[in-house]
Image (tube, rainbow, N blue to C red):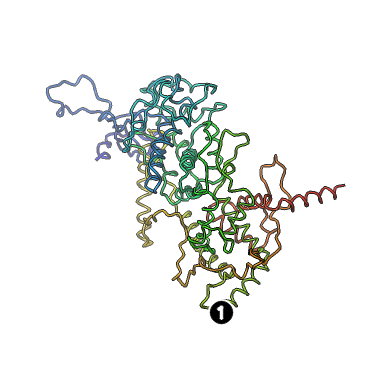
């Protein structure tokens, strides 16, 4: 219909020289060949639809923009707030306590807005135009859902919790460049938000700009404050599995929040979240907010190494004690040994585990990486992992299991290696295929300005149609069923012969009695790092795969895949634990190196 109405225009397109016109929703002519939109509109000359009136002038458009087409006047911080609301809602459905959103995350976000002078202060950076508002959502919470309360006067700051009190010596940042009035901003081709252009160019010393990765960091800080049973690697995996909004989080924005131009660079994400990047963001945000000491990580907390080690021992299909015996922490199985190493190195101390952003030289613990590193150290204590001893001990275990089929089987490193390698290879292949097939293009098309909207919408529609056609030709389902989230990536069952479970196996062939205690048959140990880098170096150690045994490489690659981290990061953590565990050995190495210099 719109092509028929546009036939009366016979001029050639200034871009492609074609004569093929269509009409946009606003009544403007656009070229159907190159999607160039002109400033010319269709003239309305039919007076039948306007009874009892006289036309005094020719209308310059078929219709006026509706409120939905024009969109709301909104600020960038409101976009981030909407993403945080969605992420918190998903975390609540995953079993996290509802207080995380309505109390902890809410107060952290309010504190950020106050510290960055975007809200809850006497002179917010928004010096003209409409003040930013809290986005309304389905959660009936007075602070999140209030309309004009977000950027009110300084009295709002008093509503912050005692754990997030602001300091009076916070430097006042320079405000954004003076914003235009809402009428002129709405017609801007730079961004859909009122301050998209200003926000993208805003650089102020001492002020931390919020980003989409920053929303994940803020969520993890809230989880850590609540001491929830979710590690950073779990959070990033839920993002990867598309349970938590991140890469296409802007798609959940209300239709009235028009997003284009500079907004695209702020909210559109084109890479998967990285563990070290989010960890860095988390530390920066906690420091910027001057957060107080977090609640203590005690032995009954999920993040304590004694509990986390059990989780990862089960995940990696390694021998784990039963619930009744585990409480005594006897060192006759792997969890007992990890408990002993934790105690000897002091890694289970409350002060070393609890995050305190304002403490001097503060560093938060990578709880999941630390627990895995403890398991790697125990595996080295038991099997040495030198591509020799582990296979000799496996021979003894297999001979014993053949002779005594009724007894509790001895743990065989070789059989465990074969099962785990096959399972991990399959999992890794599926993971790589899923990443390769991931559709980065969003269902809601992004465009540089509202003028480009018709062309962008039509191109997106064409792409979707082509995808459907190719899916039909290839006889493949275009949609993949999303799996329900789980804390475990592998599930092991005793009655599955193709994927045997080693949880109930014994370490009897590896441990020997020495008086009342049990000690390892292996009395040797090699250090993962002989010499640490200097304190001003960016990394702690240097990890080169070719310098280490194949068994050690397999163990690191297995666990680093479980956490979606680099093997070098895990190797660093193993080296740091060994440095605490073998202080004498390191001091002797240091003395020898000094004597050689002399």
Task: Give 332 or 48, whichever is nearer the viewer.
Answer: 332
Residue extending farthest to the left is 52
Query: Can residue 212 be seen at all in this image of the molecule?
Result: no
Residue extending farthest to the front is 516
Residue at the (56%, 37%) spot, across then down: 356
Name the spot of residue 123 as percent of width and height, x first. Answer: 45, 19
* 92 on left or right of 291: left
Task: Give 132 or 510, whichever is nearer the viewer.
Answer: 510
Give the mark count: 1
The N terminus appears in which quarter of the rendering? top left
Name the spot of residue 199 as percent of width and height, x first. Answer: 48, 29
Name the spot of residue 582 as percent of width and height, x first. Answer: 70, 53
Q: Which residue is mark 1?
A: 402
* 69 on left or right of 273: left
Query: Can residue 222 be seen at all in this image of the molecule?
Result: yes
Task: Give 272 or 518, whichever is nearer the viewer.
Answer: 518
Question: Is 580 placed above or below 266 here?
Answer: below
Residue extending farthest to the bottom is 403
Toward which corner of the image does residue 551 lie, by quadrant? bottom right
């Amino acid at each position: 219909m719109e092509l028929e109405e546009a036939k009366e225009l016979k001029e050639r397109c200034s871009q492609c020289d074609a004569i093929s016109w269509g009409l946009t929703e606003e009544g403007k002519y656009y070229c159907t060949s190159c999607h160039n939109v002109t400033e010319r509109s269709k003239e309305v000359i039919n007076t039948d639809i306007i009874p009892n009136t006289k036309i005094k002038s020719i209308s310059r458009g078929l219709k006026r923009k509706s409120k939905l087409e024009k969109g709301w006047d909104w600020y960038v911080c409101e976009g981030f707030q909407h993403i945080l609301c969605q992420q918190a809602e998903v975390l609540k459905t995953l079993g996290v306590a509802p207080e995380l959103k309505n109390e902890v995350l809410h107060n952290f976000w309010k504190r950020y807005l106050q510290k960055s002078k975007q809200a809850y202060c006497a002179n917010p950076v928004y010096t003209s135009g409409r003040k930013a508002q809290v986005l309304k959502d389905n959660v009936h919470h007075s602070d999140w859902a209030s309309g004009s309360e977000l950027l009110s006067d300084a009295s709002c700051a008093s509503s912050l919790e005692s754990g997030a009190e602001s300091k009076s010596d916070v430097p006042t940042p320079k405000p954004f460049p003076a914003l235009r009035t809402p009428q002129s901003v709405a017609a801007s081709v730079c961004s859909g938000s009122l301050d998209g252009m200003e926000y993208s160019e805003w650089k102020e010393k001492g002020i931390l700009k919020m980003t989409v990765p920053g929303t994940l960091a803020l969520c993890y800080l809230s989880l850590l404050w609540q001491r929830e049973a979710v590690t950073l690697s779990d959070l990033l995996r839920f993002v990867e599995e598309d349970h938590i909004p991140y890469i296409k989080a802007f798609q959940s924005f209300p239709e009235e929040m028009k997003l284009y131009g500079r907004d695209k660079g702020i909210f559109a994400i084109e890479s998967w979240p990285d563990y070290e990047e989010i960890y860095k963001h988390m530390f920066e945000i906690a420091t910027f907010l001057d957060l107080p000491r977090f609640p203590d990580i005690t032995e009954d907390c999920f993040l304590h190494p004694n509990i986390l080690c059990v989780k990862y021992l089960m995940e990696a299909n390694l021998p784990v004690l039963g619930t009744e015996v585990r409480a005594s922490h006897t060192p006759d199985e792997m969890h007992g040994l990890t408990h002993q190493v934790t105690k000897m190195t002091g890694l289970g101390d409350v002060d070393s585990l609890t995050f305190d952003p304002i403490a001097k030289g503060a560093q938060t613990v990578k709880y999941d990486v630390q627990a895995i590193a403890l398991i790697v150290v125990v595996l080295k204590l038991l099997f040495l992992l030198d591509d020799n001893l582990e296979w000799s001990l496996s021979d003894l275990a297999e001979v014993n299991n053949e002779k005594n089929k009724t007894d509790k089987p001895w743990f065989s490193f070789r059989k465990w290696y074969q099962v785990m390698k096959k399972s991990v290879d399959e999992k890794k292949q599926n993971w790589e295929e899923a990443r390769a097939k991931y559709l980065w293009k969003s269902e809601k098309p992004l465009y540089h300005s509202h003028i480009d909207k018709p062309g962008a919408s039509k191109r997106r529609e064409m792409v979707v149609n082509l995808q459907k056609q190719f899916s039909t030709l290839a006889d493949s389902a275009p949609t993949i069923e999303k799996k329900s989230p789980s804390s475990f990536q592998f599930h092991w069952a005793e009655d599955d012969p193709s994927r045997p479970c080693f949880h109930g196996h014994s370490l009897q062939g590896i441990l020997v009695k020495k008086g009342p205690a049990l000690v390892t048959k292996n009395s040797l140990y090699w250090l993962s790092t002989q010499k640490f880098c200097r304190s001003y170096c960016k990394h702690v150690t240097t990890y080169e795969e070719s310098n280490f045994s194949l068994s050690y490489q397999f163990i690191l690659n297995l666990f680093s895949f479980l956490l979606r981290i680099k093997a070098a990061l895990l190797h660093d953590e193993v080296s740091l634990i060994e440095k605490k565990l073998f202080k004498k050995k390191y001091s002797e190495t240091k003395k020898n190196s000094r004597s050689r210099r002399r």
